Image (cartoon, grey):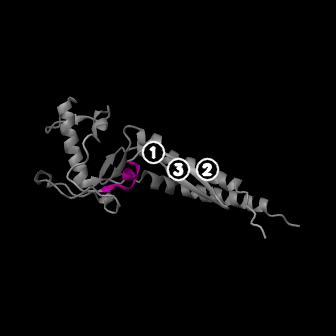
């Protein structure tokens, strides 16, 4: 008896629609201000992360897998968050580890993040620098360096909030996907059955 491969064209179409919808919603989630750990924040100021999101259908023997991908190295950190090291300096007494990242598999080990990681973000037009009095200040090399140190230390010790931009997009799209999947699978099964 030979194993006949089933034609899953309609099922694949349902997965394809689902992949497109999830990516569309994930990109939207990255652009809008969302409340995370008590603050309203926009996740993707540069637009790099949103542009990197894609999906891929992987076909096996009578099965289809859907993979969501990004070539940006920090994509998983933004999704899951990163636990803070908790190594607070005396002047950081008011800070604590971010609640949303406490279950993350990722964790900062030191008191600051790698130098240069935040530089492009700080230089971006959307980022405004302020002094201790709250007044806007120019983005001089010294001010950028100071901001990078202060923000980097806060991120490393308190953690990086989990954004769940992808998880939420998957949940938001699931209901329609289940209906499309049932319909596609039923079409494929009825097309593949030959009654003699």
Mark 3 = which residue? Answer: 22
Q: Does the rendering let one see residue 136?
A: no
- Front-most of residues 108 and 101: 108
Q: Is residue 92 above or below residue 117?
A: below
**Secondary structure type for disc 3:** helix
**Secondary structure type for disc 1:** loop
Mark 2 = which residue? Answer: 16
Residue found at the very far left of the displayed protein = 90
Q: Position of residue 152 (x, y in %)?
A: 23, 46
At x 36%, y 52%, the residue is: 77
Marked residue nearer the N-terminal end (3 or 2): 2
Marked residue nearer the N-terminal end (1 or 2): 2
Mark 1 = which residue? Answer: 71
Mark 1 in CB contact with mark 2 (< 8 angstroms): no
Q: Which quadrant of the rendered structure holds the N terminus?
A: bottom right
| Residue 183 drawn in magenta | no
**Secondary structure type for disc 2:** helix
Q: Position of residue 104 (x, y in %)?
A: 35, 60
Q: Position of residue 173 (x, y in %)?
A: 54, 54
Foreground disc of the pair 1, 2: 1
Foreground disc of the pair 3, 1: 1
Neighbor class of circle 3 (other Cα within 10 Å; few <14, some 14-19, many 20+) is many
The magenta segment: 74-82
């Amino acid at each position: 008896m030979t194993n006949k491969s089933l034609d899953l064209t309609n099922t694949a179409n349902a997965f394809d629609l689902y992949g497109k919808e999830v990516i569309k919603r994930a990109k939207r989630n990255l652009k809008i201000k969302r409340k995370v750990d008590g603050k309203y924040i926009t996740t993707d100021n540069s637009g790099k992360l949103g542009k990197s999101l894609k999906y891929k259908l992987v076909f096996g023997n009578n099965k289809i897998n859907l993979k969501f991908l990004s070539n940006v190295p920090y994509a998983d950190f933004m999704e899951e968050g990163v636990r803070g090291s908790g190594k607070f300096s005396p002047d950081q007494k008011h800070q604590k580890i971010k609640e949303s990242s406490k279950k993350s598999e990722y964790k900062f080990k030191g008191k600051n993040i790698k130098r240069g990681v935040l530089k492009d973000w700080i230089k971006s037009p959307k980022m405004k620098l302020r002094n201790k009095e709250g007044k806007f200040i120019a983005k001089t090399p010294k001010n950028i360096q100071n901001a990078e140190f202060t923000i980097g230390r806060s991120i490393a010790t308190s953690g990086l909030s989990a954004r769940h931009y992808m998880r939420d997009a998957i949940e938001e799209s699931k209901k329609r996907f289940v209906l499309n999947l049932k319909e596609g699978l039923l079409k494929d099964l009825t097309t593949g059955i030959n009654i003699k």
